[in-house]
Image (cartoon, grey):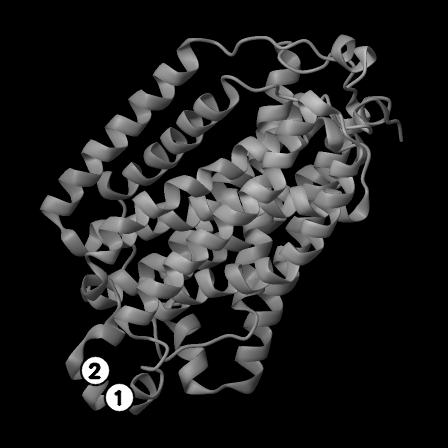
Amino acid sequence: MSNDNIVLYERKPLPTKLPLLGWSLLLIGVVLTFLAFSTDNVRASYNLIIVLMWVFSIGFGSLFLIALEHIVGSDWSVPFRRLSEILAAVLFATPLIALPLFLNLDQVFSWLNPVILDSDKYVKNKSPYLNESFFVIRNIFVFLVMFLFYFLLVGRSLRQDKTGKADTKKWSTKISAIFMPIFAILITVVAMDWLMSLEPKWFSTIFGVYYFAGSVLTALAVLTFIAITLAENGYISKYLTEDHFYNFGALMFAFTNFWAYIAFSQFMLIWYANIPDETMWYMQRGGEGWMTISLGLIFIRFLIPYMALVTRPSKSNPFRLKIIAVWVFIAHYYDLYWVIMPEYTKKTELHAPVYSWFEFTVPILVLGVIIVVFSLVAGKKNLMPIGDPKFRKGLEFHL
């Protein structure tokens, strides 16, 4: 580690109010979740799946961004990599979120209903994969593999702050290359298990890609908001420029388009084939109040962020980027609600969308998890990878 790198970044303690805010939100979220489970076990379980998949998105997306940087050899993103490494730590909260769901699987997944298993041959044919024991085992395996790659990718990076060894970069690149295909499998398994199997008769061959696109976009939004906020308040290097932030805007714009492409492709192929076991999923989201939510998804998830990011100035303006990042973060919640909650209203024969304090618990809990994890992990670490040989070059980046 060179002395130049130390001058380029000086560690500044995070505000003492940040952990207090995080723990307060988390406590409120946990209390409301307990109340929700005691009031309506089924509805609370569906909402907790939204929490789980939202947190998964941030963790998975952050790990992907770390690995992508190592593989492509990006310079501009090096100063921000530590923030992605910190955000990826939210993955360690996922087993705790999943635990109540493991105890209530039969409240959510119809493929655990003996009556449906006996009467529906399609569901029964999927029972070698969709059964309680295998479901729990493979999800525990997903947790363990995620944790392994987190330590492999992030552990070396943290040690590099002290050693400054250049060979760490080669190690990280190799690990990232191994991680990418495994990541593709893991995120597909998570999407299939917790989202697609809510309707066990339905399937989509690109649903894993759909969830991947939304996850990376959400991770980018959180990273963008945190990076700009920290830069504005002097917690990371003062040498960051609008050129750095432009790349965040460009990436959010790219993944917004990618998400729309996958979403439309999935819909168009299912609509064109017109197979009842496939179209039923969209038919359910097109009736009794859900059509409004479905049409809203087009605007909230795609058209509004697309128009907000289409010009070069909009991708460079830090204040505007923060607003767009918040919008994208909330839009992911909207997307997950659209994917998950129709299954709840179908199961309970409510049919129309529902929203009350049950659903309001979700963003409170997710924000609490993000802030608490960020405060705990970032509290004693540099917020920038000062030992990386490309750190100075990354700060000097210009378009």
Residue carrying label 2: 116
Choose between 172 and 251: the one closer to the eye.
172
**Secondary element at image label 1:** loop
Crowding at dot 1, Cα within 10 Å, few <14 / some 14-19 / many 20+, comes out as few
Quarter of the figure with residue 395: top right
Choose between 325 and 75: the one closer to the eye.
75
Residue carrying label 1: 120
**Secondary element at image label 2:** helix
Which amino acid lies under the numbered mark 2 shown in the image of this protein? Ile
Crowding at dot 2, Cα within 10 Å, few <14 / some 14-19 / many 20+, comes out as some
Callout 1–callout 2 Cβ contact below 8 Å: yes
Residue ranking furthest to the right = 399
Q: CA distance from mark 1 to mark 2?
A: 6 Å
**As displayed, is residue 43 above or below residue 28?**
below
**As displayed, is residue 89 above or below residue 291?**
above
Using the rendered image of the protein, determine whether residue 289 is visible from the camera's viewpoint.
no
Q: Is residue 117 left or right of residue 396?
A: left
